[in-house]
Amino acid sequence: MSATSNFRKKNKVCPRFTRSFEQLLDRGSRSEAPKVQCSSQSRDTIARVEPCATIGANQLAAEGVMLARQLYLAVAAIGMLAGPAAALEVSGSVVVSGKPDQVWYKSGAFCAIKEWHPAISKCEETEESGVIHRTLTTKDSATIKEKLVDKIDTSYTYEIIESPLPVQNYRAQIGDSAEADKTRVYRKGSFDAKGVSDAEAKKVISDIYKAGLDKIAKTAGD
């Protein structure tokens, strides 16, 4: 006879036992149903058995709460130790001649990237549901679609929508700021690696940034 059946038989006069307590009893052969000590001195058996069975039920409930709490704390601890994976980050900058607004006039338009990045041969700007997008064509005929997220005086933020690059969840910013009597042009981005190691993904994006910044530095005085 199972622990649950045995316990039900002994305590059938106590209907307040619920399925949750019975499940606690049936945890496997490793545990046994609690032994309930009932007084037989009184002729009124039901009056004695029911409070006694209630004590057993309360003990089971307390044990279940304790087990649940221990499990919750264990899972929470594992989650805290693991934590969410941090996005990869890459940044780069270069100082060029000229004031920020002058430099931005040449490089700040969303499709001006075709003028200052050596890998881009074409840029097509479109509007989709009120949001500006650009589709870049590289010199090896690959295409990259990006969405403009935010734009202020001398910077803009964008996200990659589609691309053959080994990254995902890519979000980046390009802008410039005053550096004494010159201008610092910067690029920074965050992303997750896709199909390659973190180091490989960071190298790809870092090389892309460097190529563009080098071109900006080379043509800044033109």
Image (cartoon, rainbow, N blue to C red):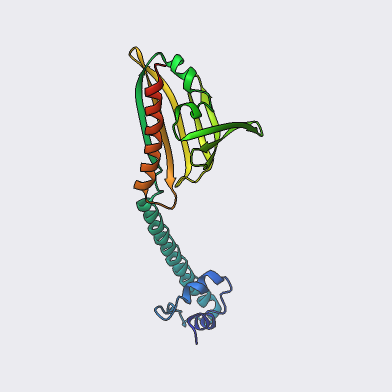
- Residue farthest to the top, as pictured: 181
Counting every numbered tag in the picture gives 0
Residue extending farthest to the right is 129
- Asked if one can make out residue 92 in the rendered structure from this viewpoint, the answer is yes
Foreground of the two, 127 or 74: 127
Can residue 154 be seen here?
no
Q: Is residue 147 placed above or below 74 in the rendered structure?
A: above
The percent coordinates of residue 31 (x first, y second) are 40, 78
Q: For this rendering, which residue is in front, 165 or 132?
A: 165
State which quadrant residue 122 falls in.
top right
Say if 63 sits above or below 76 in the image: below
Residue 97, quarter of picture: top left
Report the residue at 39% width, 16% height from top.
Answer: 221
Seen in the picture, residue 74 relative to 149 is either above or below; the reply is below
Question: Could you tell me residue 10's position as x and y percent?
Answer: 51, 82
Q: Nearer the viewer, residue 155 or 45?
A: 155
- Residue 85 horizontal side relative to residue 148, left or right: left
Where is the C terminus found, in terms of image quarters? top left
Which residue is at 48% across, 43% downward? Answer: 169
Q: Taking 76 as reference, is 164 left or right?
A: right
The structure residue drawn at horizontal position 37% and vertical position 28%, both measured from the top left corner, is: 214
Q: Position of residue 204 (x, y in %)?
A: 39, 42
Q: Residue 203 location, x and y as percent?
A: 36, 42
User: In the image, what residue occupies the spot 49% across and 70% down?
Assistant: 57
